[in-house]
């Protein structure tokens, strides 16, 4: 009889232990509605450094190419005019790796209703809409006055160079005989943005122009931002 009681005690202990472990695991795992938040870390002090190349095209002028370094760092929190809790984003630049970083501008970012909203030059953009999944789309301009701009998740959970888990978000991919507009951003888990390409070009549309079809870029720019270092 004593052995039977001890046996049932052991069974009961194993049950409570299994229940405790399952509850602990469920607390550790993030809710599915938040999946993707780790692709845009918002902890204060987190930074990412980039090498940037910008090419500017102007009609009747030589192509202008500039290269510099950029660092984006998450700052402290504050409230905006509508009471939202936001975090500062400090942008630093320098022309080479020897110079000290110089503060260029201050933007902001916030997590709001399962969206990562970044305000650049006083214009808010919905950078991420959670939960993330392959082919998911949302209007990145839903909070500003610009026309609708669909952001589409591509290359979901893919390895890229030294990063094990990345995703690509394409917001523009249009090309014709008169213009070209491309914009995509690549994010790495726990790091944030690691690469960005933006191209906006207008071509010579006059068939009689001697440069049509050979050197037909009339005006525009391209910006390529690439990861070089981060705080993590």
Image: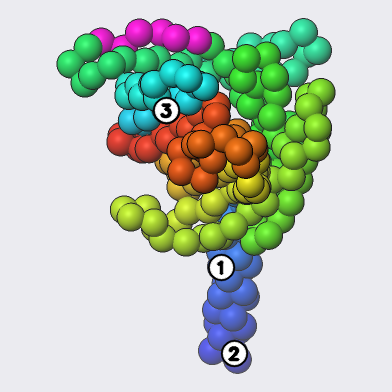
Q: Quadrant of residue 200?
A: top right
For the residues labelled 3 and 1, the Cα–Cα distance comes to 62 Å
Quadrant (top left, top right, bottom left, bottom right) of the N terminus: bottom right
Q: Quadrant of residue 144?
A: top right
Q: Characterize the local packing of mark 1: few (<14), some (14-19) or many (20 or more) Cα atoms within 10 angstroms.
A: few
* SS of the residue under disc 3: strand
Q: Nearer the viewer, mark 3 or mark 1?
A: 3
Q: Earlier in the sequence, mark 3 or mark 2?
A: 2
Residue 102 belongs to the span the image colors magenta: yes
Query: Which residue is the site of mark 1?
Result: 17
Residue 148 belongs to the span the image colors magenta: no
Image coordinates of residue 153 in percent, x first then y, are: 63, 54
Residue at coordinates 51% horizontally, 29% vertically from top-left? 221
Residue at coordinates 48% horizontally, 25% vertically from top-left? 57
* SS of the residue under disc 1: helix
From this view, report whether residue 131 is shown above or below residue 113: below
* SS of the residue under disc 2: helix
Query: Which residue is the site of mark 3?
Result: 55
Query: Which residue is the site of mark 2?
Result: 4
Q: Earlier in the sequence, mark 2 or mark 1?
A: 2
The reply to whether residue 127 is in sight is no
Magenta region: which residues?
A: 100-105
Q: Earlier in the sequence, mark 3 or mark 1?
A: 1
Task: Kindly report the secondary structure that dominates the magenta region of the rendered protein.
Answer: strand
Image coordinates of residue 192 in percent, x first then y, are: 48, 39
Name the side, left or right, on which 3 lies relative to 164. right
Q: Nearer the viewer, mark 2 or mark 1?
A: 1
Q: Nearer the viewer, mark 3 or mark 2?
A: 3
Quadrant (top left, top right, bottom left, bottom right) of the C terminus: top left
């Amino acid at each position: 009889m004593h052995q039977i009681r001890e046996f049932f005690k052991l069974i009961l202990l194993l049950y409570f232990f299994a229940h405790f472990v399952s509850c602990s695991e469920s607390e550790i795992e993030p809710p599915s509605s938040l999946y993707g938040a780790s692709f845009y870390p918002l902890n204060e002090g987190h930074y990412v450094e980039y090498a940037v190349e910008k090419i500017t095209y102007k009609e009747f002028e030589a192509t202008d190419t500039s290269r510099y370094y950029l660092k984006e760092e998450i700052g402290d929190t504050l409230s905006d005019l509508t009471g939202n809790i936001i975090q500062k984003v400090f942008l630093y630049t320098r022309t080479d790796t020897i110079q000290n970083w110089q503060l260029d501008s201050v933007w902001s970012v916030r997590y709001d209703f399962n969206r990562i909203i970044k305000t650049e030059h006083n214009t808010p953009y919905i950078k991420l809409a959670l939960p993330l999944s392959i082919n998911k789309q949302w209007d990145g301009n839903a909070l500003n006055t610009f026309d609708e701009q669909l952001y589409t998740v591509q290359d979901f959970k893919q390895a890229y160079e030294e990063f094990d888990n990345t995703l690509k978000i394409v917001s523009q991919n249009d090309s014709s005989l008169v213009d070209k507009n491309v914009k995509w951003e690549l994010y790495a888990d726990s790091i944030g943005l690691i690469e960005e390409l933006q191209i906006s070009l207008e071509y010579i549309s006059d068939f009689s122009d001697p440069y049509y079809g050979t050197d037909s870029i009339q005006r525009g720019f391209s910006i390529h931002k690439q990861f070089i270092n981060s705080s993590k």
